[in-house]
Image: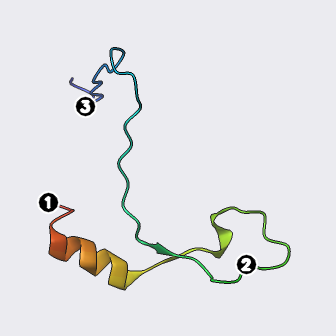
């Protein structure tokens, strides 16, 4: 705990849990030679502000 590495064991669960915040924008039409990675994504301030308004980042 001193290094703030906190682990919560979930070995007994039958499913995996995942939490994420969608604060990135992506182009509607992908570039022709896009590799499918985040190189064409950008930070979307409007999505971030909407999450702040909902209380996602407390």
Give SS at disc 1. loop
How busy is the neighbourhood of tag 1: few (under 14 within 10 Å), some, or many (20 plus)? few
Residue 20, compared with residue 36, is above or below; it is above
Tally of numbered discs: 3
Q: Give the left or right position of residue 58, taking residue 16 as reference.
A: left
Q: Residue furthest front?
A: 14
Image quadrant in which the C terminus is located: bottom left
Q: Closer to the camera: disc 1 or disc 2? A: 2
Labels 1 and 3: the sequence-earlier one: 3
* Colour mode of the rendering: rainbow
Labels 2 and 3: the sequence-earlier one: 3
The span from disc 1 to disc 3 (Cα, nearest Å) is: 19 Å
- Which residue shows up at 85% across the image and 73% down it? 33
| Label 3 sits on residue | 4
Give SS at disc 3. loop
Q: Residue furthest right?
A: 33
List x then y, in percent, for residue 12.
33, 14
List x then y, in percent, for residue 57.
20, 62
Image quadrant in which the N terminus is located: top left
Labels 1 and 2: the sequence-earlier one: 2
The span from disc 2 to disc 3 (Cα, nearest Å) is: 40 Å
| Label 2 sits on residue | 30
Give SS at disc 2. loop
Give me the disc on residue 18.
none
Q: Give the left or right position of residue 7, taking residue 16 as reference.
A: left
Q: Are marks 2 and 3 in contact (CB under 8 Å)?
A: no
List x then y, in percent, for residue 48.
32, 75
Q: Are marks 1 and 3 in contact (CB under 8 Å)?
A: no
Q: Closer to the camera: disc 1 or disc 3? A: 1
How busy is the neighbourhood of tag 3: few (under 14 within 10 Å), some, or many (20 plus)? few
Give the quarter of the image for residue 8.
top left
Give me the disc on residue 58.
1
């Amino acid at each position: 705990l001193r290094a703030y590495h906190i682990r919560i064991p979930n070995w007994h669960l039958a499913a995996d849990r995942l939490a994420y915040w969608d604060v990135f924008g992506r182009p509607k039409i992908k570039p022709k030679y896009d590799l499918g990675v985040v190189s064409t994504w950008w930070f979307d301030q409007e999505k971030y502000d909407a999450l702040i308004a909902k209380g996602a980042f407390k």
